[in-house]
Every structure is written in structure tokens, then in C-alpha cells.
Image: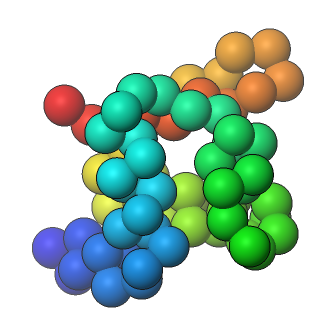
Amino acid sequence: MDAVFRALSDPIRREILGILRAGERTTGELADRFPVTRPAVSRHLRVLHEARLVERRKEGRNQIYSLVP
């Protein structure tokens, strides 16, 4: 439960969840929407994944993220 609260405590992570409500996105597609580096977005996605709020799958060289149903 602490992991979920930690994940939701950051405004960028909450915005990522809002974007993913519209459908799955790659790390790059998400990174293009924020004024932070791609590695920073990857760290945010890792936190969301560890909290089991998002799923990821690999497609070629891309990581595809979506909300956990």
C-alpha cells in the first residue's frame, strides 16, 4: 500500500496515469510530453510499475506501458 501512495504522491506520475487512461504509450511518447529527461520519465514509470499501477511489455526496442485493468 505504501508503494501506491508513494507512486501517487508525484504530480508527473499522476499525469502519466491520466495519459495512459487514453491508451497505451511508449516511454518515448510519454517523455515527449514532459519537461524532464527521458531517464527521469523512465524512473517515474518504474515507480508506477513497482506499485502495480501500470503494466509494461516489450515490443522490439520499445517498452509499451498501459494501466493495470
What x and y, as percent, mark residue 53? 30, 51
What x and y, as percent, mark residue 44? 56, 67
Q: Quadrant of the N terminus?
A: bottom left
Q: How many marks?
A: 0
Q: Is residue 46 above or below residue 44?
A: above
What x and y, as percent, mark residue 8? 30, 75
Q: Residue furthest top?
A: 60
Q: State left or right for residue 44 relative to residue 69.
A: right
Q: Quadrant of residue 58?
A: top right
Pick whichever, 20 or 64, lies toward us.
20
Residue 50 in view (yes/no): no
Q: Quadrant of residue 33?
A: bottom right
Residue 12 in view (yes/no): yes
> Which residue shows up at 82% across the image and 69% down it?
37
> Which residue shows up at 47% across the image and 28% down it?
24
Pick whichever, 45 or 31, lies toward us.
31
What x and y, as percent, mark residue 15? 42, 63
Q: Is residue 40 above or below residue 65?
A: below
> Which residue shows up at 50% across the image and 73% down it?
12
> Which residue shows up at 31% across the image and 39% down it?
21
